[in-house]
Amino acid sequence: MAFIARNPVTNHLEFSDAADLSTGQYVASAQWIGETAHITAQSPTFPNTFWVCVLQNSTTHQWLQLATAGATLLPDQRFTVGTPDYNLLDPGVATFTSVAFGITAANAGVGLVPPSGASAAAQRLVEIQPQTYAEVSPLSLVPYVHLHGMGNGPEATVIAGPALTVQYTGGAGYLVVRDINFSDVDFSILPTGNVTIVFENCSFTNGTTWALTTPGTGVLVVVRFINCSGQFATSSDTIAATDNLYKEFNGAMSEADGVTKTLSFAALPTYAGAGNLNLLITGGQRLQTNGTEMSRFQGTVVADVITEECLLSTQNTGVSVWSVTTTSLTGVSWQARSGTRLDATPASYFNAGAGATAIFRGGQVEILGHTVTTGSPLNPIGAGSVTSQNYPSNRQRWTQNLTLVVPASDGAGGGPYASAAAAVAAMEFPQPVDAFADEFRLVADYTALGADPLDPDTANFATTFRYASFRLPNPLFLEEGREYVFKNAGDPSSATDGPVALRLPNGSTTTVDYMFSEISVRPVFVSTDYIILGNGDAVRISVDRSGVQARYVITT
């Protein structure tokens, strides 16, 4: 008896037990489908004797003799249930005309002697030859019966609608689906027990939808999308009370740029119910919505979100990252680990509705765009509550270059202001500073003053007050340890570039170290109350939330 295997280094087919086969006395041919080779060999000594072998990856399989001559009578292997027990001696046993027939046969153990059902100890694999399969609805997925499209990537093997429901209504188990394109199908996932469902290198196209509901019996449901692409028209997960859903989007980090395939959502994805959700986005995954938040958490669901080495793309600077309407006691928490990137500056991290609670557990968030909107990232849109917890890490850096042309004083032709607040507003950098940059490089241009001197006293708002200022974000809305760098990038040798005062928002209860740097309390921009940056000066400050009162501390 001879054996065959693929050398993983040379990618050549190699024979062992050399009698006949390796000496060239047999005529052998191989058909590769994905990573599987279907090989037949004919004996020149006995022309009516054929041998067949299925070679999966680098695994060695024994040759089996076929009793009936002629390659046309061999199993075409369109659907191969790949357990070692399957009897390839009987042509047609492992050949099916639809995915449903293949799943049914694999689940029942057709071809086994004696037949036995799929189980954790006897798992099955349905190998699907590349083409498009228009299945009869519903197409039922079964635990321990795994599906593998045999094309080079998911595009070659297509399970297509319209009006096709792909459902899972089974109990406890494990299921892997690889290299298949689901086109215009509706997923209906209704497990009755603890189950893990993995989609690996699959694509979802042409209006495919996703709907999952847990049974409310204390189950754990795990759904993983690994290196998947395409778009879901709608996506909803409903987690019943006492149940847990773990959902993972993992890009598998197969590309050098750190971001692999894009999986997008045409409508806002939702997580509802009263159970517990763990959501992980990692591995270079790019998730994209059509101008909405990344997800909405509603009902009374409790959600724990972790992002790491991923790109979250809303394609819209006017929306938040997450929408939170759940009124559960602990609400939604988000931990942004290393490599979390946003394609555009969000309006806020959370759009939190009335009664909703959100927690930002800190970490690294990198903004790829340079679009800036008003508001602290922790200042929620909506009436909900947002708090932050410290998560030590080094932030990705984003620098903003800003220039303020200071208006002329009254003595040089400028008109008076109605109030000190209006005067300061005119002297303030137009950049909304409650934003997301880590470093601000500022240039204050005093050319319009001519020979008039600087006047830092806001009481002279109707006449000569002229002094550039930069309003700091309120540290009350920022995470512990958040750092900012401010540099006056004006030319030290310039006669027209000048100083900048860093101030807190009026009415703030916070401080910069022990300085009350806001004009309603300290109306004159002097160094005893404000950080004054001359041309070329820089300062680094960080948020300290350890005490009763949030404040900035000067670190350098």
Image (cartoon, rainbow, N blue to C red):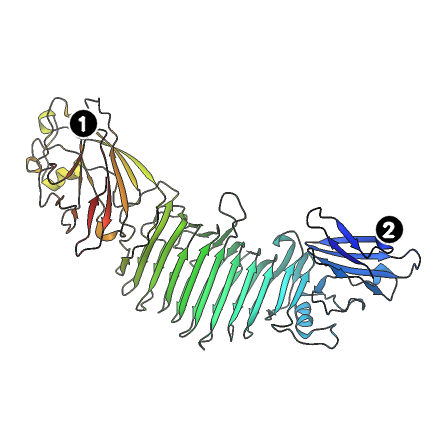
User: The disc labelled 1 sits on which kind of residue?
Assistant: Tyr
Determine whether, in the image, residue 49 is placed left or right of residue 397.
Answer: right
Residue at image coords 89%, 57% = 43
Residue 181 or residue 250, whichever sits in front:
250
The secondary element bearing badge 1 is classed as loop
In the rendered view, tell whether residue 98 sits above or below residue 26.
Answer: below
Of mark 1 and mark 2, the one earlier in the sequence is 2
Q: Which residue is mark 2?
A: 23
Q: x, y percentage for residue 4?
A: 77, 56
Disc ID at residue 384:
none
Q: Which residue is mark 1?
A: 446
User: The disc labelled 2 sits on which kind of residue?
Assistant: Thr
Visible in this render: residue 234?
Answer: no
Q: x, y percentage for residue 265?
A: 47, 56
Work out how far the residue at label 1 is from the one at label 2, CA to CA, in angstroms. Answer: 91 Å
Quadrant in which the C terminus is drawn: top left
Determine whether, in the image, residue 423 is placed left or right of residue 58.
Answer: left
* Residue located farthest toward the front when viewing the structure as drawn: 17
